[in-house]
Image (cartoon, rainbow, N blue to C red):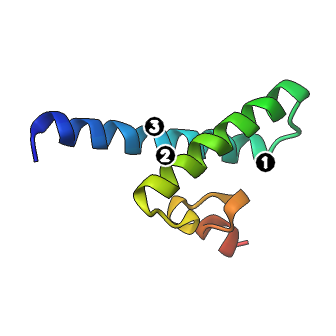
Amino acid sequence: MSNRTENDRLLAELEYRTAVAEFDRLWGSNPSPEDQVNMERLIRLIDAFESAHAVQPADAGCVAFGGRRAARR
């Protein structure tokens, strides 16, 4: 695998994990209407990444998706 391909994959995964963390943060708050719009955008990005990379939602550890943190509650 070329360095560019590896870097792109790592960047995509970092962006995915950042989107999951932001969604998780918003999920745990009292989201404003603007936050809700942002959450809808984030969920589309998250779903697209998971579909393209065969990621199971629980892998992300997102409370909203029943991930590892939700299991500890």
72 relative to 10, above or below: below
Mark sitting earlier along the chain (3/1): 3
Find the distance from the CA under tag 1 to the CA under tag 2.
16 Å
Q: Which residue is mark 2?
A: 17
Amino acid type of the residue tagged 2 in the rendering: Arg
Q: Amino acid at mark 3?
A: Glu
Residue at image coords 30%, 42%: 10
- Identity of the amino acid at label 1? Gly
Q: Please say if the residues under marks 3 and 1 sit with CB atoms less than 8 Å apart.
A: no
As drawn, is 65 to the left or to the right of 15?
A: right
Q: Nearer the viewer, residue 14 or 48?
A: 48
Instruction: Tell me whether the residue at label 3 lies in contact with that at label 2, contact meaning CB atoms closer than 8 angstroms.
Output: yes
Q: Where in the figure is residue 20, as x and y percent of width and height?
A: 58, 46
Asked whether, in this view, residue 62 is left or right of residue 49, the answer is right
- At a point 16% along the width and 33% down the height, the residue shown is 4
- Along the line of sight, which residue is nearer the eye, 48 or 25? 48
Q: Which residue is mark 1?
A: 28
Residue 26: x percent and y percent?
75, 40
Q: Nearer the viewer, mark 1 or mark 2?
A: 2
The quadrant in which residue 68 appears is bottom right
Q: Residue furthest top?
A: 34
Residue drawn at (65%, 38%), measured in percent from left and top?
A: 42
Earlier residue among tags 1 and 2 = 2
Looking at this view, name the residue that lies furthest to the bottom: 71
* Disc 3, SS: helix
**Does dot 1 land on a helix, a strand or a loop?**
loop
- Image location of residue 2, percent across then percent down: 9, 40
Percent coordinates x, y for residue 55 in the rendering? 47, 62
Residue nearer the viewer, 48 or 39:
48
Q: Is residue 28 above or below residue 22?
A: below
Q: Check disc 3 and report the residue beneath it.
A: 15
Give above or below for 65 relative to 5: below
